Image (spheres, coloured by chain):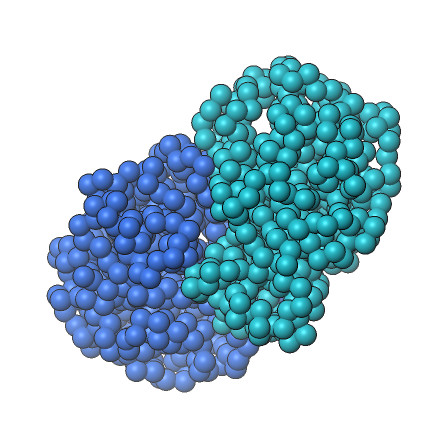
Chain colours: A cyan, B blue
């Protein structure tokens, strides 16, 4: 059993549209990148256990059940345990949690979490229908009741095609506006801030700056959300190698990052018309306890901005900004690089992109670079403690799964 | 961190056809059964982490990504981590492995592994097409080349509908017949033995005794396999609660079973025309090492007999019978209850049934009952050490994943 767990290496493909790369190509590129990063002695044969995160490969391409084995065998991995994991948009973070736990248990000195998603399969209709699996498919009526309860009338037939999750986030946003008086301008400020951050991220899907006015003037998806407030459909892969002290020595890792906490949780039944007792609060509280820190000690965070509103809400639930002030904080510049608590320096899901299984690991990639002081023009000065929040699915008024990871630079 | 891990409780629905029960109903029934079994103080609120094993729910019913969260929230579980895992027909055993590792790591004192599969969805064609996801779907040509290499011509167009896996097992069987001279009669003896065992299992899908002659005379699927040599399409759920010493005390468990080893592995590239260096050998060797025992100390085993040939092969790979003698051992009665090394006292997949995600956990259910001396007319006298082997998928000439679990009665 190992008392400390480290990130030895991180890898990531550019997120974007990769017409000539398969799901497995994306995974392998990310893994090779992570191995190179892990240390001068690192090689594929040193990995003791692997977790393969892909939420869409079975659905979109019919490669279910052993996707990870096929991807990894092609790289020369033999006989090691490979587990295929799925947890909606928090699939990558769940794989990370399992990899860390395996090292913690002494079952592995070097563990791999890799996520890959090929979302552009030439059939946009099919890709969008993927999102119809992320709630209780036997009870769509109750999903719709919950949304009306949260956000009022949903009947906006003229707004064109979008995933059900944009409607869900829009309903939650309207609930937030009702309770706290937050505004579409504030939500747009989050989007504008993340688009500005992405300009300097060579691995981001979109790298164009947008003003608050640009964001508000863009095509509306579901009030108050417009297109640039929502994560695009993106292909990509990301990989993280975690290890014990013994693993670090074997790999000859130069810049290890310590894993202070990784907590995954599912929701409780509560009054969903408020945000009290939200799943992310529970998970964050547990993660802060494990890490032995409070939210005020976090220097930089990656937050699951599947929509700009999600960042508003989650930055409050994580205690990074006061309740109701997620939007106002963005408007004031508090959450920009250089601000009090920079959020999504990578550009976040809205600009970097959201290849489901890779997303949570892509957050860890960014934060590892930040803690190593290697983030270039996106560097958050003096970052020592970093937090990643990744969530997904929807059940009974909130995410079905949320993950919080806390990391420390050395 | 916990040095010892125990099985506190096991639960299982009858395996069979459940027209009025959903995937989640089956899971919940199995969990309730396991909780009752775990101890007088046990209740759903004591579970610290859950692993939900379902290989088909997304494919067959469109409930992907958060199936476990939905199933468990309905039982009153809140905020705990829930992970959805998939590893072809070894999905259940993989969930068990992850649950044990979480307890070992000290991340949980009580962990749940639950598997459920609703395979009868009123569309047999769709159910069978599920099996077309368990190999590399981008390279069917190489799958077919491997099968011809193993077993000669595959062209038997008149044998009717069957899953590709029956063809794969048939090719492997023909290879075994070529190398060792094993016979269709020996393979039929395995099936007859398992059908005889199932007669006394009230949870089995089929409970009729069949003679070797009956088995050989049944409809042929792919030479040398006939229908009763192959696992049927089955619905069912199974659950296992594992825990630490502290968990045992909290649950007030009366008959704990110790987990000596749980090892999961994936294949290597080797000459697939022999059986040397087969994945199951690697995994079993590691499991015996961890458990500190040899194959001669195993008193009873559940072996993944998706076909009767699979049991022939795996009983050899596990070292329970000498190489080439898997069929002969069954013919001699060595692997019957009362024989030298009873295999599949439950009736195995051929008779008990094979609800994919539940299968590996159903094996643990049977062995736990055996080690507690509660198996009734199926009891293997004096069973103290038990082994379960569960495998699935197919990649480059062998299973893509194999699990071996070794348990000890107290």
Q: Does residue B199 appear in the picture of this structure?
A: no
Q: Does residue A175 appear in the picture of this structure?
A: yes
Residue drawn where x is 58% and y is 19% of the image: A150
The answer to whether residue B159 is above or below residue A196 is below
Image location (x, y in percent) of residue B58: 52, 44
Front residue of A165 and A279: A279
Q: Quadrant of the C terminus of chain A?
A: bottom right
Counting the numbered discs, the total is 0
Residue drawn where x is 78% and y is 23% of the image: A185
Image location (x, y in percent) of residue B388: 32, 64
Front residue of A144 and A177: A177
Q: Is residue B250 rendered to the left or right of residue B405?
A: left
Q: Quadrant of the N terminus of chain A?
A: bottom left
Residue B320, located in which quarter of the rendered image?
Answer: bottom left
Residue drawn where x is 65% and y is 18% of the image: A180
Front residue of A84 and B396: A84
Image location (x, y in percent) of residue B301: 27, 66
Image location (x, y in percent) of residue B142: 61, 70
Q: Is residue A368 rendered to the left or right of residue B339?
A: right
The answer to whether residue A83 is above or below residue B77 is below
Front residue of B287 and B216: B287
Residue drawn where x is 38% and y is 76% of the image: B285
């Amino acid at each position: 059993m190992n008392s400390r767990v480290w990130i030895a290496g991180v890898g990531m493909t550019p997120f974007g549209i990769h017409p000539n790369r398969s799901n497995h190509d994306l995974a392998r590129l990310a893994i090779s990148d992570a191995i190179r990063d892990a240390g001068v002695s690192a090689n594929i044969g040193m990995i003791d256990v692997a977790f393969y995160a892909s939420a869409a490969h079975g659905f979109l391409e019919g490669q279910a059940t052993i996707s990870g084995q096929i991807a990894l065998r092609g790289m020369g991995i033999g006989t090691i345990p490979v587990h295929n994991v799925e947890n909606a948009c928090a699939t990558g973070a769940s794989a990370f949690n399992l990899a860390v736990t395996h090292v913690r248990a002494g079952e592995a000195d070097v563990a791999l979490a890799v996520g890959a998603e090929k979302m552009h399969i030439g059939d946009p209709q099919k890709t969008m229908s993927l999102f119809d699996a992320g709630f209780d498919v036997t009870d769509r009526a109750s999903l719709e009741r919950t949304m009306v309860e949260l956000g009022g009338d949903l009947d906006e037939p003229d707004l064109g095609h979008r995933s059900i999750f944009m409607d869900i986030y829009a309903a939650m946003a309207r609930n937030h506006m009702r309770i706290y008086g937050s505004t579409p301008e504030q939500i747009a400020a989050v989007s504008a801030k993340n688009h500005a951050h992405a300009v300097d991220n060579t691995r981001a899907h979109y790298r164009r700056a947008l003003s608050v006015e640009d964001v508000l003037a863009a095509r509306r998806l579901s009030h108050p959300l417009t297109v640039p407030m929502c994560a695009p459909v993106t292909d990509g892969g990301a990989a993280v190698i975690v290890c014990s002290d013994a693993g670090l020595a074997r790999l000859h890792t130069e810049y290890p990052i310590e894993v202070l906490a990784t907590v995954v949780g599912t929701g409780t039944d509560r009054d969903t018309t408020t945000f009290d007792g939200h799943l992310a609060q529970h998970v964050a509280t547990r993660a802060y306890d494990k890490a032995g820190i409070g939210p005020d000690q976090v220097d930089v965070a990656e937050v699951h901005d599947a929509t700009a509103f999600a960042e508003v809400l989650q930055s409050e639930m994580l205690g990074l900004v006061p309740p109701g002030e997620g939007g106002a904080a963005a408007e004031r510049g508090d959450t920009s690089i250089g601000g009090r608590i920079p959020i999504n320096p990578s550009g976040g899901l809205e600009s970097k992109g959201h290849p489901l299984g890779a997303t949570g690991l892509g957050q860890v990639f960014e934060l590892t670079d930040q803690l190593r002081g290697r983030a270039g023009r996106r560097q958050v000065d003096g970052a020592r403690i970093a937090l990643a929040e990744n969530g997904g699915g929807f059940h009974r008024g909130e995410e079905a799964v949320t993950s919080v990871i806390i990391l420390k630079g050395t």
